[in-house]
Amino acid sequence: MQETQAIQPVNSAVEKINPFELLIADKRSEATRRAYRADLEAFFCGNPSVEEVGRFVAQPAAKIALELAVYKNSLLQKGLAEATINRRLAAIRSLLKLAHRLGYASTDGRNLVDSEKIIAYRDTRGVDLETLRQLLQTPGTGDLRGLRDTAILRLFCENALRRAEVYGLNVGDFSASQRTLMIAGKGRGTQRQPVTLSERGVEAIVGYLLRAGHATDQSGPLFRNLDHRPQHLRQRLTSDGLFYLVKSYGEAIGVKNLTPHKLRHSAITAALDATGGDVRKVQRLSRHADLRTLSIYDDNRSDFQGEVTGVLSDLL
């Protein structure tokens, strides 16, 4: 009887507010919102409606646990990677946590379903320095597109910026005199932090802005879409646009599946090579909060395991 009384107001409340939409709106990053939406829509079979979300979160914890166990088993049967399964389960837990906080759910999602155990491994492979040099020369500087794309590629290759960090840049974030960009780093919300640019990086951005003619639009996007259709004119170059920009230039020099994040990996690895593996210096470039992440880059770069295997092979 008490359980029925606790769940009854939940259903009426969810009819007015959908925790799914609240959860998505709470994420600052466009990429994060997109990922959460995709994962939760997959769980709700493309229909995260008020009624369906309300039905799910208002169930007793045991029934939710059963539904999650069945869902996880279906993901395993499809052969999804462990990291993908864990990400989807984490999105559902976040939904339950929010719904519980709002009084819509009887559980916050903890201890209902186990995540898959995974080996902590990060693929830090990128491209070598010669390929980076070739990439930077590919756009050219003869037209507006070449100037823009050269400036963007320099930010990826010289400053190891993330795609979302480049996407969010406004003209006012750039200071040629101070050689800085104010970026919204990962996990920092709207707080911005300065990164120092190279002289060539500053020249590339200045050259682009002078040709583009929007250097005085301080609140406007730094990198604009060059599509001349009315609905796209003067709009911010999208995150997807940055992805395909890098991919297309990679294909132009014979590198398949080149991405902004691979350029970030390449820049960090090259920096470790140049500094003799000084992870503290390179941490300033990468802005990783945990030095252990850079240790993974350094281990992969040095291939200590391969070195020791070679020693054993000689001994044997």
Image: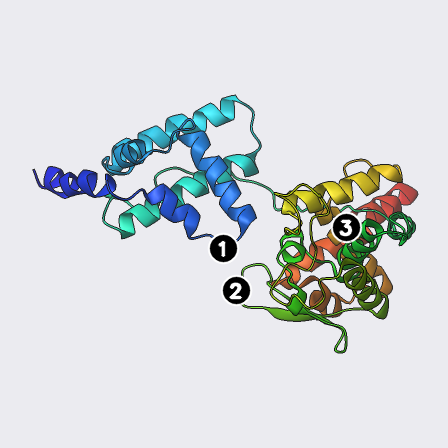
Pick whichever, 246 or 231, lies toward us.
231
Residue 28 numbered tag:
1
Spot the residue most to the bottom.
177
Q: Secondary structure at mark 1?
A: loop
Colour mapping: rainbow
Percent x, y for residue 242?
70, 47
Q: Are marks 1 and 2 in contact (CB under 8 Å)?
A: yes
Left or right: where does residue 49 sit relative to residue 125?
left
Pick whichever, 73 or 171, lies toward us.
171
The Cα–Cα distance between marks 1 and 2, rounded to whole angstroms, is: 8 Å
**Of pointers 1 and 2, the one earlier in the residue sequence:** 1
Percent x, y for residue 243?
70, 43
User: What is the quadrant of the N terminus in the image?
Assistant: top left
Q: Amino acid at mark 3?
A: Leu
In the image, residue 157 above or below residue 119:
below
1 vs 3, front mark:
1
Q: Amino acid at mark 1?
A: Arg
Locate residue 207: give its quadrant: bottom right
Q: Are marks 1 and 3 in contact (CB under 8 Å)?
A: no
Q: Which residue is mark 2?
A: 190
Left or right: where does residue 219 sit relative to residue 15?
right
Counting every numbered tag in the picture gives 3
Residue 108 visible in the displayed image:
no
Locate residue 310: give its quadrant: top right
Residue at figure coordinates x 56%, y 38% from the top left: 83
User: What is the quadrant of the C terminus in the image?
Assistant: top right
Q: Which residue is mark 3?
A: 263
Q: Amino acid at mark 2?
A: Thr
Residue at figure coordinates x 61%, y 46% from the top left: 120
Would you call the spot at circle 2 few (<14 residues within 10 Å), some (14-19), or many (20 or more)? few
